[in-house]
Amino acid sequence: MTQQHETTFPNTALGVTLVLQSVAAVIFMSAAVLAPALPPELGLDEAGIGLFGGVTFAGAMFGSPLAAVFIRQQGAVRLTQAGLLLSVAGLMALLLQNWWIALAGALLIGLGYGPNAPGGSHLLARHAPPARRGLYFSIKQSGVPIGGAIAGLSLPLIEETFGWMSAVLAVLALTAVTIFIVQPWRARLDPERDLPRQPVRVRFGDIIPLEGMKSHPLLPFISFTAFAYGGGQMIMFTYTVIFLTGQAGFTLVDAGVAYAVMQGSSFAMRILAGWINDRWRRPRPLLAGFGLVTAVGVTLLASIGPDTSWMAVLAIAALCGAAAAGWNGVYLAEVARIVPQEKIAAATGATVFCTYFGLVIGPAVFGAAVQAGGYGLAYGGLAGLALIGAAAVFARKAV
Protein backbone atom coordinates (compact mmCIF):
# COMPACT_ATOMS: atom_id res chain seq x y z
CA MET A 1 0.00 0.00 0.00
CA THR A 2 1.49 3.32 -1.04
CA GLN A 3 1.43 6.53 0.93
CA GLN A 4 -0.55 8.14 -1.90
CA HIS A 5 -3.35 5.58 -1.49
CA GLU A 6 -3.33 6.02 2.27
CA THR A 7 -3.99 9.76 1.95
CA THR A 8 -7.10 9.57 -0.23
CA PHE A 9 -9.62 10.22 2.58
CA PRO A 10 -8.53 13.49 4.20
CA ASN A 11 -12.01 14.96 4.61
CA THR A 12 -13.45 11.73 5.99
CA ALA A 13 -10.62 11.44 8.50
CA LEU A 14 -11.02 15.06 9.53
CA GLY A 15 -14.79 14.82 9.89
CA VAL A 16 -14.74 11.64 11.96
CA THR A 17 -11.96 12.80 14.27
CA LEU A 18 -13.67 16.18 14.73
CA VAL A 19 -17.00 14.59 15.68
CA LEU A 20 -15.41 12.11 18.08
CA GLN A 21 -13.28 14.82 19.70
CA SER A 22 -16.29 17.12 20.12
CA VAL A 23 -18.45 14.54 21.87
CA ALA A 24 -15.55 13.41 24.06
CA ALA A 25 -15.15 17.03 25.14
CA VAL A 26 -18.86 17.32 25.99
CA ILE A 27 -18.52 14.34 28.34
CA PHE A 28 -15.27 15.66 29.74
CA MET A 29 -16.60 19.12 30.58
CA SER A 30 -20.09 18.21 31.77
CA ALA A 31 -19.18 17.98 35.46
CA ALA A 32 -17.45 21.38 35.46
CA VAL A 33 -20.43 23.05 33.75
CA LEU A 34 -23.02 21.44 36.02
CA ALA A 35 -20.98 21.70 39.24
CA PRO A 36 -22.93 24.63 40.80
CA ALA A 37 -26.18 22.69 40.38
CA LEU A 38 -24.96 19.31 41.64
CA PRO A 39 -26.06 18.10 45.09
CA PRO A 40 -23.71 18.66 48.07
CA GLU A 41 -23.29 14.89 48.49
CA LEU A 42 -21.07 14.88 45.41
CA GLY A 43 -18.68 17.37 47.00
CA LEU A 44 -17.96 19.24 43.76
CA ASP A 45 -17.45 22.67 45.33
CA GLU A 46 -14.47 24.96 44.63
CA ALA A 47 -11.98 22.48 46.10
CA GLY A 48 -13.80 19.31 45.07
CA ILE A 49 -14.13 20.19 41.38
CA GLY A 50 -10.38 20.73 41.22
CA LEU A 51 -9.73 17.26 42.64
CA PHE A 52 -12.36 15.78 40.31
CA GLY A 53 -10.65 17.39 37.34
CA GLY A 54 -7.25 16.18 38.52
CA VAL A 55 -8.44 12.58 38.80
CA THR A 56 -10.08 12.85 35.39
CA PHE A 57 -6.85 13.88 33.76
CA ALA A 58 -4.91 11.29 35.71
CA GLY A 59 -7.00 8.75 33.83
CA ALA A 60 -6.37 10.53 30.52
CA MET A 61 -2.65 10.75 31.27
CA PHE A 62 -2.41 6.96 31.29
CA GLY A 63 -5.21 6.32 28.82
CA SER A 64 -3.47 8.21 26.02
CA PRO A 65 -0.19 6.22 25.92
CA LEU A 66 -2.06 2.94 26.42
CA ALA A 67 -4.25 3.80 23.44
CA ALA A 68 -1.14 4.36 21.32
CA VAL A 69 -0.15 0.74 22.02
CA PHE A 70 -3.45 -0.71 20.80
CA ILE A 71 -4.13 1.60 17.84
CA ARG A 72 -2.19 -0.50 15.34
CA GLN A 73 -4.26 -3.55 16.25
CA GLN A 74 -7.77 -2.17 16.83
CA GLY A 75 -7.68 0.99 14.72
CA ALA A 76 -8.06 4.59 15.84
CA VAL A 77 -11.81 4.87 15.19
CA ARG A 78 -12.73 1.70 17.10
CA LEU A 79 -10.49 2.62 20.02
CA THR A 80 -11.99 6.12 20.25
CA GLN A 81 -15.52 4.71 20.10
CA ALA A 82 -14.68 2.42 23.01
CA GLY A 83 -13.23 5.41 24.85
CA LEU A 84 -16.51 7.31 24.49
CA LEU A 85 -18.39 4.41 26.07
CA LEU A 86 -15.97 4.28 28.97
CA SER A 87 -16.14 8.04 29.52
CA VAL A 88 -19.92 8.27 29.51
CA ALA A 89 -20.08 5.33 31.93
CA GLY A 90 -17.89 7.37 34.26
CA LEU A 91 -20.17 10.39 33.91
CA MET A 92 -23.18 8.23 34.81
CA ALA A 93 -21.51 7.59 38.18
CA LEU A 94 -22.66 11.08 39.21
CA LEU A 95 -26.21 9.77 39.28
CA LEU A 96 -25.36 7.66 42.34
CA GLN A 97 -24.62 10.88 44.31
CA ASN A 98 -21.64 9.51 46.21
CA TRP A 99 -18.30 11.33 46.43
CA TRP A 100 -16.07 8.25 46.17
CA ILE A 101 -18.07 6.73 43.32
CA ALA A 102 -17.91 10.10 41.56
CA LEU A 103 -14.10 10.07 41.83
CA ALA A 104 -14.01 6.56 40.37
CA GLY A 105 -16.21 7.85 37.57
CA ALA A 106 -13.79 10.73 37.00
CA LEU A 107 -11.01 8.19 36.45
CA LEU A 108 -13.13 6.36 33.86
CA ILE A 109 -13.95 9.63 32.09
CA GLY A 110 -10.22 10.32 31.75
CA LEU A 111 -9.27 6.82 30.63
CA GLY A 112 -11.94 6.98 27.94
CA TYR A 113 -10.75 10.40 26.79
CA GLY A 114 -7.21 9.09 26.31
CA PRO A 115 -7.49 7.68 22.75
CA ASN A 116 -8.48 11.03 21.19
CA ALA A 117 -5.00 12.58 20.86
CA PRO A 118 -2.97 9.57 19.59
CA GLY A 119 -5.93 8.31 17.56
CA GLY A 120 -6.49 11.65 15.87
CA SER A 121 -2.79 12.12 15.19
CA HIS A 122 -2.55 8.59 13.77
CA LEU A 123 -5.40 9.23 11.33
CA LEU A 124 -4.54 12.78 10.28
CA ALA A 125 -0.82 12.07 9.84
CA ARG A 126 -1.83 9.32 7.40
CA HIS A 127 -4.61 11.16 5.54
CA ALA A 128 -4.06 14.94 5.81
CA PRO A 129 -2.19 16.67 2.95
CA PRO A 130 1.28 17.57 4.28
CA ALA A 131 1.00 21.19 3.15
CA ARG A 132 -2.21 21.63 5.16
CA ARG A 133 -1.39 19.42 8.12
CA GLY A 134 -1.32 22.28 10.62
CA LEU A 135 -4.81 23.38 9.56
CA TYR A 136 -6.18 19.84 9.73
CA PHE A 137 -4.78 19.25 13.21
CA SER A 138 -6.14 22.59 14.40
CA ILE A 139 -9.61 21.86 13.01
CA LYS A 140 -9.61 18.46 14.70
CA GLN A 141 -8.54 20.01 18.01
CA SER A 142 -11.29 22.59 17.64
CA GLY A 143 -13.57 19.75 18.66
CA VAL A 144 -12.59 20.53 22.26
CA PRO A 145 -14.12 24.05 22.26
CA ILE A 146 -17.02 22.86 20.12
CA GLY A 147 -17.80 20.28 22.78
CA GLY A 148 -17.29 22.88 25.50
CA ALA A 149 -19.68 25.30 23.78
CA ILE A 150 -22.30 22.57 23.41
CA ALA A 151 -21.96 21.72 27.09
CA GLY A 152 -21.95 25.36 28.20
CA LEU A 153 -25.05 26.34 26.22
CA SER A 154 -27.22 23.23 26.45
CA LEU A 155 -26.58 21.62 29.83
CA PRO A 156 -27.51 24.64 32.01
CA LEU A 157 -30.75 25.03 30.06
CA ILE A 158 -31.59 21.33 30.42
CA GLU A 159 -30.72 21.51 34.11
CA GLU A 160 -32.90 24.58 34.64
CA THR A 161 -35.89 22.94 32.95
CA PHE A 162 -35.59 19.25 33.83
CA GLY A 163 -32.89 18.97 36.49
CA TRP A 164 -29.23 17.97 36.51
CA MET A 165 -29.89 14.23 36.13
CA SER A 166 -31.68 14.86 32.83
CA ALA A 167 -28.67 16.87 31.63
CA VAL A 168 -26.38 13.93 32.38
CA LEU A 169 -28.73 11.51 30.58
CA ALA A 170 -28.78 13.85 27.56
CA VAL A 171 -25.00 13.43 27.31
CA LEU A 172 -25.49 9.65 27.35
CA ALA A 173 -27.93 9.90 24.45
CA LEU A 174 -25.56 12.12 22.46
CA THR A 175 -22.74 9.62 22.95
CA ALA A 176 -24.79 6.67 21.75
CA VAL A 177 -25.91 8.50 18.61
CA THR A 178 -22.33 9.57 17.82
CA ILE A 179 -20.90 6.06 18.09
CA PHE A 180 -23.59 4.84 15.70
CA ILE A 181 -23.08 7.70 13.21
CA VAL A 182 -19.31 7.27 12.73
CA GLN A 183 -19.43 3.47 12.39
CA PRO A 184 -19.92 3.36 8.58
CA TRP A 185 -16.62 5.19 8.02
CA ARG A 186 -14.56 2.81 10.12
CA ALA A 187 -13.97 0.53 7.11
CA ARG A 188 -12.13 3.37 5.34
CA LEU A 189 -10.15 4.66 8.29
CA ASP A 190 -9.27 1.52 10.25
CA PRO A 191 -7.30 -0.72 7.86
CA GLU A 192 -5.80 -2.35 10.96
CA ARG A 193 -9.03 -4.32 11.38
CA ASP A 194 -8.05 -6.47 8.37
CA LEU A 195 -4.53 -7.26 9.62
CA PRO A 196 -3.71 -10.54 11.38
CA ARG A 197 -4.20 -10.25 15.14
CA GLN A 198 -0.94 -10.11 17.05
CA PRO A 199 -0.68 -10.35 20.85
CA VAL A 200 -0.17 -6.94 22.43
CA ARG A 201 2.29 -6.65 25.26
CA VAL A 202 2.04 -3.61 27.49
CA ARG A 203 5.36 -2.59 29.01
CA PHE A 204 6.03 -0.15 31.81
CA GLY A 205 7.47 2.19 29.20
CA ASP A 206 4.11 2.15 27.41
CA ILE A 207 2.32 3.36 30.56
CA ILE A 208 4.98 5.98 31.39
CA PRO A 209 5.90 6.71 27.77
CA LEU A 210 8.79 9.09 28.24
CA GLU A 211 10.93 6.98 25.93
CA GLY A 212 9.05 8.63 23.08
CA MET A 213 10.84 11.86 24.00
CA LYS A 214 13.92 10.44 22.29
CA SER A 215 12.24 10.78 18.90
CA HIS A 216 13.53 14.38 18.57
CA PRO A 217 15.67 16.75 20.70
CA LEU A 218 12.96 19.42 20.76
CA LEU A 219 10.26 17.17 22.20
CA PRO A 220 11.14 17.67 25.92
CA PHE A 221 10.92 21.46 25.55
CA ILE A 222 7.72 21.39 23.51
CA SER A 223 6.29 18.99 26.09
CA PHE A 224 7.10 21.32 28.99
CA THR A 225 5.33 24.16 27.21
CA ALA A 226 2.35 21.87 26.66
CA PHE A 227 2.49 20.91 30.36
CA ALA A 228 2.27 24.57 31.41
CA TYR A 229 -0.35 25.54 28.83
CA GLY A 230 -2.41 22.42 29.43
CA GLY A 231 -2.61 23.14 33.15
CA GLY A 232 -3.77 26.68 32.43
CA GLN A 233 -6.34 25.54 29.90
CA MET A 234 -7.89 23.03 32.27
CA ILE A 235 -7.96 25.54 35.13
CA MET A 236 -9.80 27.96 32.87
CA PHE A 237 -12.35 25.37 31.79
CA THR A 238 -12.81 23.91 35.27
CA TYR A 239 -13.22 27.10 37.30
CA THR A 240 -14.79 29.72 35.04
CA VAL A 241 -18.41 28.75 35.77
CA ILE A 242 -17.80 28.36 39.51
CA PHE A 243 -15.89 31.67 39.63
CA LEU A 244 -18.58 33.60 37.77
CA THR A 245 -21.44 32.18 39.83
CA GLY A 246 -19.71 32.29 43.21
CA GLN A 247 -17.61 35.47 42.99
CA ALA A 248 -19.30 37.61 40.36
CA GLY A 249 -22.91 36.73 41.15
CA PHE A 250 -23.98 35.46 37.73
CA THR A 251 -26.67 32.83 37.23
CA LEU A 252 -25.68 29.37 35.98
CA VAL A 253 -27.23 30.11 32.60
CA ASP A 254 -25.32 33.41 32.23
CA ALA A 255 -22.08 31.78 33.35
CA GLY A 256 -22.75 29.02 30.83
CA VAL A 257 -23.06 31.63 28.07
CA ALA A 258 -19.70 33.16 29.06
CA TYR A 259 -18.23 29.66 29.13
CA ALA A 260 -19.59 29.02 25.62
CA VAL A 261 -18.08 32.30 24.39
CA MET A 262 -14.74 31.18 25.82
CA GLN A 263 -15.06 27.90 23.92
CA GLY A 264 -16.18 29.67 20.76
CA SER A 265 -13.15 31.96 20.72
CA SER A 266 -10.96 28.93 21.33
CA PHE A 267 -12.51 27.24 18.30
CA ALA A 268 -11.90 30.27 16.08
CA MET A 269 -8.33 30.68 17.31
CA ARG A 270 -7.44 27.03 16.74
CA ILE A 271 -8.51 27.32 13.12
CA LEU A 272 -6.75 30.67 12.66
CA ALA A 273 -3.60 29.42 14.39
CA GLY A 274 -3.46 26.38 12.12
CA TRP A 275 -3.84 28.58 9.04
CA ILE A 276 -1.12 30.97 10.27
CA ASN A 277 1.20 28.08 11.14
CA ASP A 278 0.91 26.54 7.67
CA ARG A 279 1.86 29.86 6.06
CA TRP A 280 4.25 31.44 8.55
CA ARG A 281 6.13 28.19 9.25
CA ARG A 282 7.36 29.47 12.62
CA PRO A 283 5.45 27.45 15.21
CA ARG A 284 7.64 28.26 18.21
CA PRO A 285 7.06 32.06 18.25
CA LEU A 286 3.38 31.34 17.64
CA LEU A 287 3.28 28.99 20.65
CA ALA A 288 5.09 31.53 22.83
CA GLY A 289 2.55 34.20 21.92
CA PHE A 290 -0.24 32.10 23.38
CA GLY A 291 1.48 32.11 26.78
CA LEU A 292 1.97 35.88 26.79
CA VAL A 293 -1.66 36.62 25.94
CA THR A 294 -2.88 34.02 28.45
CA ALA A 295 -1.05 35.85 31.24
CA VAL A 296 -2.87 39.06 30.29
CA GLY A 297 -6.21 37.30 29.98
CA VAL A 298 -6.21 35.58 33.37
CA THR A 299 -5.19 38.84 35.04
CA LEU A 300 -8.26 40.50 33.56
CA LEU A 301 -10.42 37.50 34.47
CA ALA A 302 -9.41 37.78 38.12
CA SER A 303 -10.66 41.37 38.15
CA ILE A 304 -14.26 40.47 37.28
CA GLY A 305 -16.75 41.30 40.01
CA PRO A 306 -20.50 41.95 40.46
CA ASP A 307 -20.12 45.48 38.96
CA THR A 308 -18.30 44.34 35.81
CA SER A 309 -20.36 44.96 32.69
CA TRP A 310 -21.72 41.94 30.85
CA MET A 311 -20.00 42.88 27.59
CA ALA A 312 -16.66 43.18 29.41
CA VAL A 313 -17.16 39.72 30.90
CA LEU A 314 -17.83 38.27 27.45
CA ALA A 315 -14.80 40.06 25.97
CA ILE A 316 -12.52 38.74 28.72
CA ALA A 317 -13.94 35.24 28.31
CA ALA A 318 -13.26 35.41 24.56
CA LEU A 319 -9.67 36.58 25.13
CA CYS A 320 -9.00 33.85 27.70
CA GLY A 321 -10.47 31.13 25.51
CA ALA A 322 -8.48 32.15 22.43
CA ALA A 323 -5.20 32.41 24.33
CA ALA A 324 -5.41 29.56 26.81
CA ALA A 325 -6.90 26.96 24.47
CA GLY A 326 -5.93 27.95 20.94
CA TRP A 327 -2.47 26.38 20.89
CA ASN A 328 -3.23 22.65 20.77
CA GLY A 329 -3.35 22.10 17.04
CA VAL A 330 -0.10 23.98 16.44
CA TYR A 331 1.62 21.90 19.10
CA LEU A 332 0.33 18.52 17.82
CA ALA A 333 1.13 19.39 14.21
CA GLU A 334 4.69 20.33 15.19
CA VAL A 335 5.17 17.03 17.00
CA ALA A 336 3.87 15.14 13.96
CA ARG A 337 6.13 17.19 11.65
CA ILE A 338 9.45 16.66 13.41
CA VAL A 339 9.27 12.89 14.00
CA PRO A 340 9.09 10.02 11.48
CA GLN A 341 5.65 8.68 10.52
CA GLU A 342 6.14 5.38 12.36
CA LYS A 343 6.95 7.24 15.61
CA ILE A 344 4.10 9.77 15.52
CA ALA A 345 1.72 7.81 17.77
CA ALA A 346 4.46 7.10 20.34
CA ALA A 347 5.80 10.66 20.28
CA THR A 348 2.30 12.09 20.57
CA GLY A 349 1.55 9.75 23.46
CA ALA A 350 4.73 10.89 25.25
CA THR A 351 4.12 14.60 24.81
CA VAL A 352 0.42 14.32 25.62
CA PHE A 353 1.39 12.42 28.78
CA CYS A 354 3.29 15.52 29.90
CA THR A 355 0.37 17.73 28.89
CA TYR A 356 -2.00 15.63 30.95
CA PHE A 357 0.34 15.82 33.91
CA GLY A 358 -0.19 19.58 33.86
CA LEU A 359 -3.91 19.01 33.51
CA VAL A 360 -3.85 16.66 36.51
CA ILE A 361 -2.05 18.90 38.97
CA GLY A 362 -3.23 22.26 37.59
CA PRO A 363 -6.85 22.25 38.85
CA ALA A 364 -5.89 20.66 42.18
CA VAL A 365 -3.14 23.21 42.87
CA PHE A 366 -5.38 26.05 41.72
CA GLY A 367 -8.14 24.88 44.05
CA ALA A 368 -5.70 24.77 46.97
CA ALA A 369 -4.51 28.29 46.09
CA VAL A 370 -8.10 29.55 46.05
CA GLN A 371 -8.67 28.08 49.50
CA ALA A 372 -5.41 29.54 50.83
CA GLY A 373 -5.40 33.04 49.34
CA GLY A 374 -8.41 33.56 47.09
CA TYR A 375 -8.79 33.85 43.34
CA GLY A 376 -6.32 36.74 43.07
CA LEU A 377 -3.45 34.56 44.26
CA ALA A 378 -4.58 31.59 42.19
CA TYR A 379 -4.94 33.50 38.93
CA GLY A 380 -1.65 35.31 39.55
CA GLY A 381 0.10 31.95 39.79
CA LEU A 382 -1.57 30.84 36.58
CA ALA A 383 -0.29 33.95 34.77
CA GLY A 384 3.24 33.17 35.94
CA LEU A 385 2.96 29.56 34.76
CA ALA A 386 1.88 30.72 31.29
CA LEU A 387 4.92 33.00 31.02
CA ILE A 388 7.28 30.18 32.02
CA GLY A 389 5.71 27.96 29.37
CA ALA A 390 6.23 30.65 26.75
CA ALA A 391 9.91 30.97 27.69
CA ALA A 392 10.43 27.18 27.49
CA VAL A 393 9.62 27.22 23.78
CA PHE A 394 12.96 28.90 23.14
CA ALA A 395 15.04 26.92 25.65
CA ARG A 396 16.75 25.03 22.82
CA LYS A 397 17.61 26.05 19.29
CA ALA A 398 15.63 24.42 16.51
CA VAL A 399 17.20 21.30 15.04
Image (tube, rainbow, N blue to C red):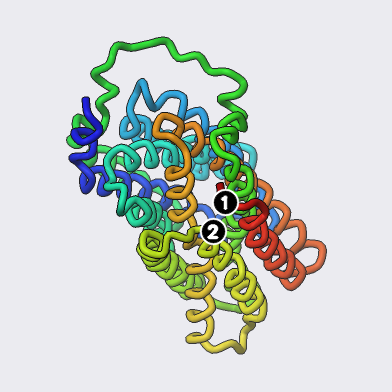
**Residue 312: percent from left, percent from top:** 52, 85
Type of amino acid at the residue the image marks with label 1: Ala
The residue nearer to you, when weighing 343 against 241, is 343
Q: Can you identify the residue that label 2 sits on?
A: 284
The x, y position of residue 59, in whole percent, is 57, 37
Whichever of callouts 1 and 2 sits on the residue coming sooner in the sequence is: 2
**In the rendered image, which residue does mark 1 sit on?**
398
**Residue 221 seen in this snapshot:** yes
Q: Residue at x 57, y 51 (%)?
A: 398
Q: Could you say whether the residue bearing mark 1 is in a helix, strand or loop?
A: loop
In the rendered image of this protein, does residue 133 appear above or below residue 382?
A: above
Which is nearer the eye, 356 or 288? Answer: 288
> Is 367 in front, or is 203?
203
Name, please, the residue furthest toward the right: 372
| x, y percent for residue 267 | 39, 64
Q: Position of residue 191 (x, y in %)?
A: 25, 26
- At label 2, counting other C-alpha atoms closer than 10 Å, the crowd grade (few under 14, some 14-19, many 20 or more) is some
Which residue is pictured at 46% across the width and 40% down the height?
113
Q: CA distance from mark 1 to mark 2?
A: 9 Å
Specify whether residue 48 is in view: no
Residue at left 82%, top 62%?
372
Q: From the viewer's perspective, is residue 115 above or below residue 391? A: above
Question: Decide: marks 1, 2 in contact (CB < 8 A)?
Answer: yes
Left or right of 260, for residue 224: right
Which residue does the image show at 42% across and 70% down from the upper left? 265
Q: Look at label 2 and name its amino acid.
A: Arg
